[in-house]
Image (cartoon, helix red, strand yellow):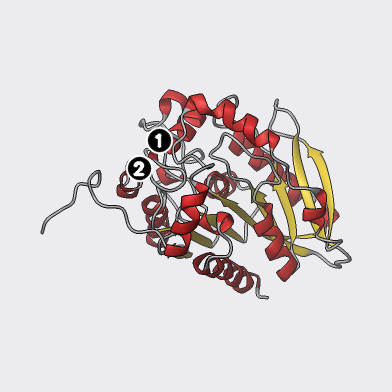
Amino acid sequence: MSTTDPSSAPPPPFDPELAAALAVLGETLPTSLTAEMIPLMRTERAKMPGVPDEAITRGGAFEMEERAVPGPAGAPDISLLICRPTGATGPLPAVYHIHGGGMIVGDNRRGIENALDWAQELQLVVVSVEYRLAPEHPHPAPIEDCYAGLVWTAAHAAELGIDPERIIVAGASAGGGLAAALALMARDRGGPALAGQMLMCPMLDDRNDTPSSHQMAGLGVWDRTANETGWTALLGDARGGPDVSPYAAPARATDLSGLPPAFIDVGSAETFRDEDVAYAGAIWRAGGSAELHVWPGGFHGFDGLVPQAAVSQDARAARLRWLRRLLGG
């Protein structure tokens, strides 16, 4: 049987609808990112309009509150964006949302649209956490901020109208990696018992050496160079070495038993494909529950960037179906 060098294997094709959109997106969205580009990227993003309150409250569908809560010991307070269905009674399930951005950009409004869609459909509370960003705040600052916010949310569940036994962690990309790490940390510290983990194209493995990371170098969104930049910002010289914590890179975990049910999805034409598939396999081997979707021809974050594509609509529908089954709705 012949084997293919992953560095020379041809990339899988992009979905035709996504490929057409990617040709346009590529004019403004760089595939590769270096450390020198981080300040400029932040500056450019700061010029863009943020997600306004009206987009979050959705015409009065949600009551919104921003609250500063205690951060990790010795660290600053963190900001939680709390969105509750207007007029809802009784404790509701909650999505604890962690934003993406490669560990280096973003805020607690980034990517919240997905969680609000679920909340509107299923009557959920959304709590979105603001965490400190690398490289100014390397590991463990981001995950410790996320954990502190989760602990506070669970402790104040009654005040927030949340059912503490039905809290799901969710995130995309870097947020998906942090959500996976948070599930590990909550298990190991005896923290809040989570009902599930929604991991959308999660960033899990600092080693950055899977076949898909080589196949997609220079292609799509968030390629191998960008991935090295993000992980190095978080871990510095430790990136790729022997001593990286699973709370930084969940793919490093050797024990995935005792975790809440997971939903993992990823595109077939993106850097994270193989590490995400491997993580689902490791959960199954540990006797856990994971639903895995590999969306054919999907690039990183395709459903957010090209929401009208058929494959994007399928991905969004699958997430909602999983949540509905998990929550018994």
Horizontal side of 57 relative to 194 (left or right) equals right
Provide the secondary structure element on which disc 1 rests: helix
Q: Is residue 279 visible?
A: yes
Instruction: From the image, tell me which residue sits under label 2.
Output: 217
Name the image quarter holding the C terminus.
bottom right
Horizontal side of 152 relative to 90 (left or right) equals left
Provide the secondary structure element on which disc 2 rests: loop
Q: Give 35 or 84, whichever is nearer the viewer.
A: 35
- Residue 146 figure quarter: top right
Looking at marks 2 and 1 on the same chain, the residue that comes earlier in the sequence is marked by 2
Which residue shows up at 49% across the image and 67% down it?
A: 311
Q: Give 24 or 198, whichever is nearer the viewer.
A: 24
The three-letter code of the residue at mark 1 reads Thr
Name the image quarter holding the N terminus.
bottom left
Asked if the residue at tag 1 contacts the one at tag 2, i.e. Cβ–Cβ closer than 8 Å, the answer is yes
Q: CA distance from mark 2 to mark 1?
A: 7 Å
Which residue shows up at 40% across the image and 61% down it?
A: 297
Q: Position of residue 217 (x, y in %)?
A: 35, 42
Q: Position of residue 147 (x, y in %)?
A: 64, 42
Vertical side of 78 occupied by 257: above or below: below
Q: Residue reaching furthest left?
A: 1
Tell me if mark 2 has few (under 14), some (14-19) or many (20+) residues whose alpha carbon lies within 10 angstroms of its own: many
Q: Is residue 134 visible?
A: no
| Label of residue 249 in the image | none
Vertical side of 87 occupied by 34: above or below: above
The three-letter code of the residue at mark 2 reads Ala
| Label of residue 225 in the image | 1
Q: Give 194 or 80, whichever is nearer the viewer.
A: 80
